[in-house]
Amino acid sequence: MSLPRLCIALFLFLASAAFAEETLAPIEVRIDVAVPLRDGVELKATVHRPQRQAQPLPCLLTMTPYNAQDLHDVGAYFAARGYVFATVDVRGRGNSGGTFTPFAQEADDGYDVVEWLARQPWCNGRVGMWGASYLGYAQWAAASRAPPHLAAMAPSASPMPGLDFPMRHNIWRPYVVRWLMLVAERTAQVRLFSDHAYWNPRLAEAFTAHAPYASLDTLFGSANATFQEWIAHPLLDAYWRGFRPSDAQYARIDLPVLTITGQYDADQPGALTAYREHLANATPPARAKHWLVIGPWDHAGVAEPQAKVRGVDVGPAGVVDMNALHRAWYDFTLKDGPKPELLKAPVAYYVGGLEQWKYAESLAAIGDEPQAWYLSSANGRANDIYASGDLVGERAKRSGADCYVYDPLDVSDAALDPLNTPEREFVDQRRVALRGGKQLVYHTAPFDADTEIAGFFRLSAWIAIDQPDTDIEAAVYAIAPDGGSILLSFDRVRARHRGGLHQATLATPGKVERYDFERFAFAARVVPKGARLRLVVGPVNSPHVQKNYNSGGEVSRETAKDARKVRVTVYHDARRASALYVPVAARP
């Protein structure tokens, strides 16, 4: 089970397709417009303007490491509606000068570009920023330098380096190598990057051959210095924190901000972290100008929402016209127009099943107190969806424990990988069913009424492992009376990072400790009467995730010779109550 592995390059193509459907008013375009930086490097911009522009207008800026031409339709859309739209190739990409170093340059360069735009005769001095994924990160980076003429921003699906990309909660993905290949040359290698039929067999081959993660750059191309530099920092340390705004920099961001993410967005952790850290450090007036939208979307869907997301049906209200939303946002913030209809409160979130938008004053205000469902089992059997344990409302009165064994040399998941089709990824339980005996499964009783879940799951589990390290995944599904399933959320914990992402402490074999899975993605869905929740706890063993061989060594360099079978035991007794905390809201 994995979240989408789509890149912002696909995101841009989807966005462009949506914009292209409209008939646009006359515009003019200038390419290779030179933008000088303070150190003498010149970036190149493509500038879209209304034809025969009569007076200065607000300017929209996006900074991309991909291809500026991919955003032609976006620029045309806004230019036809009274904006100047500038697409700038970041340093070292496209026709821009300098050397591209991912994430390292966008802060100072972004400041310079914003201020350059504000000085142009066709700009009225009000600059807004647009874009998603890396383009969303570039907005936060530029804003951290507080350019005086940056007047609004709308970071969508924005990653947080070190948190959700290139690793997610200190567990890496081979996707990183693929992305670095995409941006290895001055023009993005989009077709090769998007060829799943090329990549997936090679990932499976590396997985079955037990190739060390650190060698993947040479398996899929030449050695990549950026990749090797990144994997030398497996913790969320000062290196990674250097790419994000500091508390003091967040405190200086005093402008309207619209954060957009999706419940299935792979970069939701980064988007929400930036949102929270800005609110935590900003002044009250600045906090009042920050809105958050969480839709029923995956990463690509943040650009162009669809009626079906990886098999999950989305009602018409969730298929938001992103063109109109962004235009309304910039009309509101840069032209003093009315507030967008969707922003009825500081937080707007979509509830699946109910198929409606709901609103809250803050993330913390969504839902009631979490309900605890305690893990339980009969005779220590909880290893199969047909012979599962239970999630019950009361703590156990007697001793109990369940266990599974994970062998890193077991590569059978490579054979299951073709079942993980994008069209049904979030509703297909075949992988769970076929891994019987290698995981733990727990069910609630059928719900006696429709139950709205909105917020963040949390699992607190008492666990012992008999090796120094392993990776553990916890996933929560809604199971309909007819057996159909929907993935609600998941989290992964590497044992050595159980005390926090900034530190590594190997486990003491056999010692029972509490593991807190508290980084589940936001979920909002009505679970219908008669349905149940399913909790699956098991190993992380997939061609699409870095393999941990459980030895306690440097995970990126481990191979088959380091492999150790691990027994993972989950305790649930009167003294050590393991529980899933469910964010149950008021009944609809």
Image (tube, helix red, strand yellow):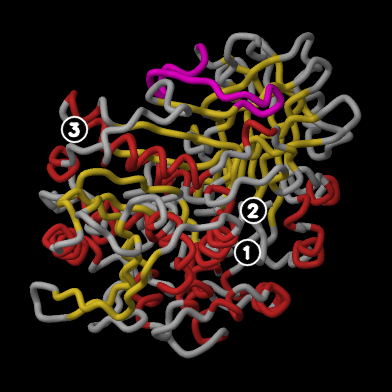
Give the CA separation, mark 1 to mark 2: 8 Å
Q: Are marks 3 and 2 in contact (CB under 8 Å)?
A: no
* Residue 191 visible here: yes
**Quarter in which the C terminus is drawn:** top right
Q: Quadrant of residue 397?
A: top right
Q: Quadrant of residue 275?
A: top left
The image shows residue 534, relative to residue 24, as above or below, that is above
- Kindly identify the residue that appears in the image at 73 percent across and 40 percent down: 312
**Can you give x and y, in whole percent of width and height, for residue 446 in the image?**
81, 17
- Kindly identify the residue that appears in the image at 24 percent across and 52 percent down: 57
Amino acid residing under circle 2: Ser
Q: Give the labeled residue for mark 1.
A: 544
Q: Upstream in the sequence, badge 1 or badge 2?
A: 2
**Can you give x and y, in whole percent of width and height, for residue 175 in the image?**
55, 68
- Say few, some or many: other residues with alpha carbon within 10 Å of mark 1 (under 14 / 14 to 19 / 20 or more): many
The image shows residue 358, relative to residue 269, as above or below, that is above
Region in magenta: 351-368
Q: Upstream in the sequence, badge 3 or badge 1?
A: 3
What is the secondary structure assignment of the residue under circle 1? loop
Give the CA separation, mark 3 to mark 2: 34 Å
Amino acid residing under circle 3: Ala
Q: Is residue 402 magenta?
A: no
Q: Upstream in the sequence, badge 3 or badge 2?
A: 2
From the image, state whether disc 3 or disc 2 is nearer to you.
Answer: 3
- Kindly identify the residue that appears in the image at 63 percent across and 29 percent down: 571
What is the secondary structure assignment of the residue under circle 2? loop
Towards the viewer: 302 or 580:
302
Q: Give the labeled residue for mark 3.
A: 282
Q: Give the labeled residue for mark 2.
A: 2
Q: Are marks 1 and 2 in contact (CB under 8 Å)?
A: yes
What is the secondary structure assignment of the residue under circle 3? loop
**Can you give x and y, in whole percent of width and height, for residue 319 in the image?**
63, 39
